[in-house]
Amino acid sequence: MRRVVVAALALALAGCAAQPAGPRTPDADALAGSITVFAAASLTGAFTGLARDFESRHPGTTVALNFAGSSDLATQLAEGAPADVFASADEKNMTKATDAGLGVGEPVDFATNVLEIAVAPGNPDGIDGLADLDDPDVATVVCAPAVPCGSATAAVAAAAGVALSPVSEESSVTDVLGKVVSGEADAGIVYVTDVLAAGDTVEGVAIDEADRAVNTYPIVALRGSDEPALARAFVAFVAGPDGRRVLHAAGFGAP
C-alpha cells in the first residue's frame, strides 16, 4: 500500500513539473526604482497624494510627476520626452499618444470630471450661470480649445447658446484658476475638482449644461520605459480601489 501511494505521489509531482511555466507577474513587494508620470494639470492634487501613497506602499520606489495641459503633454511625448506613464484629461489626447505607438496595451479609464465656474469668494458679480459670462463687464478666462477643459467649455457654451468672449485662453486649467484666485479675472471655467481643491480661495457656480461635456480620464504605461513593471503597477494602483478612493475624495466621478 505504501509503495502505491509513493508511486502516485511521484507521478503527480512529475506531472506538475511537466507543465509549462506561465507568465510571471512581478511581486508587488519587490517593486523598486523610479518612474516619471505625465499627468493632466487637473490631476495635480489627486496624483500628488496617489504618488505619495504608492511610494509608501512600495518602499524603494519613486514617482516623479510632471503636470501640464494634456495636449502639451501628448506633444512632448510624441517629440520624445522621457516618461513611463501618461494620464490624460480626455480621450482625444490619449488617442494621439496611442496612435503614435507610445502606449503599452489599452489605456484604462479611471475617472471623469465636469466643468464649473470659479469666481471670487462671495461671488461679488452675482454670477449664476454661463449666460452671465456673456456680459462684457465680466472678465472671463477659459482654457485654450486644444486643452480638454477648453474643448469641454466650447461644448457646454454651445449647449447653453452662449457666445463667450474670454479675456484670455490658457494652456492649462490650473492657469485659469490662478487668474481667478489672483483677481486678474472675475470668472474662470474650470473643473469641479479644481474648485474643491482651491478651498476658500474661490467659490463655485454650477453649470446647468455641464453634463453635456463629461471628460473621461484614461491612463496608460508607456513604451520604452526603463521600469515597465513599476509603470504597470502604478497604472493598476490608480485604476484600482485605492486610487478610486483618493479620486472620489478629490471630486472626480467614476469612469
Image: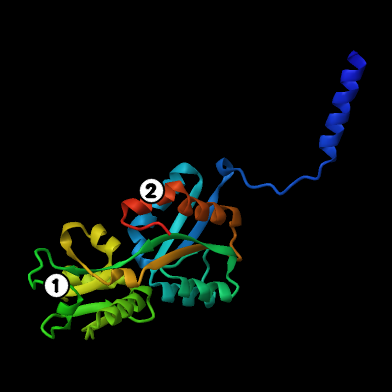
Element type where label 2 sits in the image: helix
User: At 31% across and 71% down in the image, what residue appears?
Assistant: 173
Q: Residue furthest top?
A: 1
Element at label 1: loop
Which x, y percent locates residue 30? Answer: 58, 42
Amino acid type of disc 2? Arg
Decide which of tag 1 and tag 2 comes sooner along the chain. Answer: 1
**Residue 119 falls in which quadrant of the image?**
bottom left
Q: How far from the left and from the top, in percent, is residue 12?
A: 84, 30
Query: Which one is nearer the viewer's eye here, 171 or 242?
Result: 242
**Residue 169 tag number:** none
Examine the rendering and report whether any part of residue 221 can be seen. Answer: no
Residue 41: which quarter of the image? bottom left
Residue 51: where, in percent of width, then height?
A: 42, 52
Q: Badge 1, how many Cα within 10 Å: few under 14, some, many 20+?
A: few
Residue in front for this viewpoint, 117 or 160: 160
How many callouts does the rendering have?
2
x 26%, y 78%: residue: 142
In the displayed structure, 35 sits above or below 172; it is above
Image-based side of 138 in relation to 197, left or right: left
Q: CA distance from mark 1 to mark 2?
A: 33 Å
**In this orientation, which residue lies closer to the viewer: 22 or 162?**
162
Name the quarter where the N terminus is drawn. Answer: top right
Circle nearer the viewer, 1 or 2: 2
Question: From the image, which quarter does the C terminus lie in?
Answer: bottom left
Which residue position is annotated with label 1?
Answer: 183
Q: Which disc, if any, is residue 245?
A: 2
**Mark 2 surroundings: few (<14), some (14-19) or many (≥20) residues within 10 A:** few
Left or right, 6 with respect to 118, comes to right
**Amino acid type at image mark 1:** Gly
